Image (spheres, grey):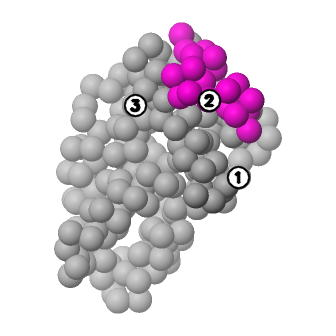
Amino acid sequence: MLRKEKAILTKNKVFETAIELIKEKGYDSVTISQICEKAGVAKGTFYVHYKSKEDIIKESYYFDMSQFVLKQYQNLSSKDKKMSIKGKIEKFLISEFMFANYVGYTMTCRAYVTNLNECISEGSKHFEKREFTKVLKKLILEGVDQNVFETDQPVEEIFLYLESFVRGLMASWCFSNEEFDIVKKGEKYISKILKRL
């Protein structure tokens, strides 16, 4: 195994362990030492991949979300080789809700707080960091080129509309104290939105 591949596996292990512990004990009750011990890595290894526990939160909604969403999207969309563009967009967006469900309520809430604070203090590079959204933009462009949308909005407007819905539902899930199943609600609403788009 190449060094780079091994580093990715180690980072994934640290991340997955952190998610598991935070879901089990709560964010404030988990220490970096506990994460390292359970993941079977040295503290130095943790700091190679993350600057702090808070950094796991930041990274989770960028690098880790990208990996998860792209993998889930591939799994969902590969089941039907003749899937329509709108169907593919739906599966992509559902994959984002699946990530929120996977990392859990606490991590999703913390990600909003952490990333919004970063916007205020440092200026956001949010959309540049979210590499996986390039796939969504490509799907939207295909849809525009094939005239599958009722709207004459450009790609960027459709993208903003759909991503705003996803972020909004995630925020509502946080504000409701995870009162509803985010994946099921997401599937229901996305289907309706795409039919009208």
**Category of crowding for the residue at label 1, using alpha-carbon neighbours closer than 10 angstroms: few (below 14), some (14–19), many (at least 20):** few
**Circle 2 — which element?**
loop
Q: How many marks?
A: 3
Quarter the C terminus occupies: bottom left
**Which one is earlier in the sequence, the residue at label 2 or at label 3?**
2
**Circle 3 — which element?**
loop
| Amino acid of disc 2 | Val
| Amino acid of disc 3 | Gly
Query: Which residue is denoted by mark 1 in the rendering?
Result: 125
What predominant SS class does the magenta segment belong to? helix
**Which one is earlier in the sequence, the residue at label 3 or at label 1?**
3
Q: 57 or 190, which is in the foreground?
A: 57
Residue 86 position (above or below residue 162): below
Quarter the N terminus occupies: bottom right
Query: Which residue is denoted by mark 2 in the rendering?
Result: 41
**Category of crowding for the residue at label 2, using alpha-carbon neighbours closer than 10 angstroms: few (below 14), some (14–19), many (at least 20):** some
Residue 83 position (above or below residue 111): below
x and y percent of residue 191 in the render?
Answer: 22, 60
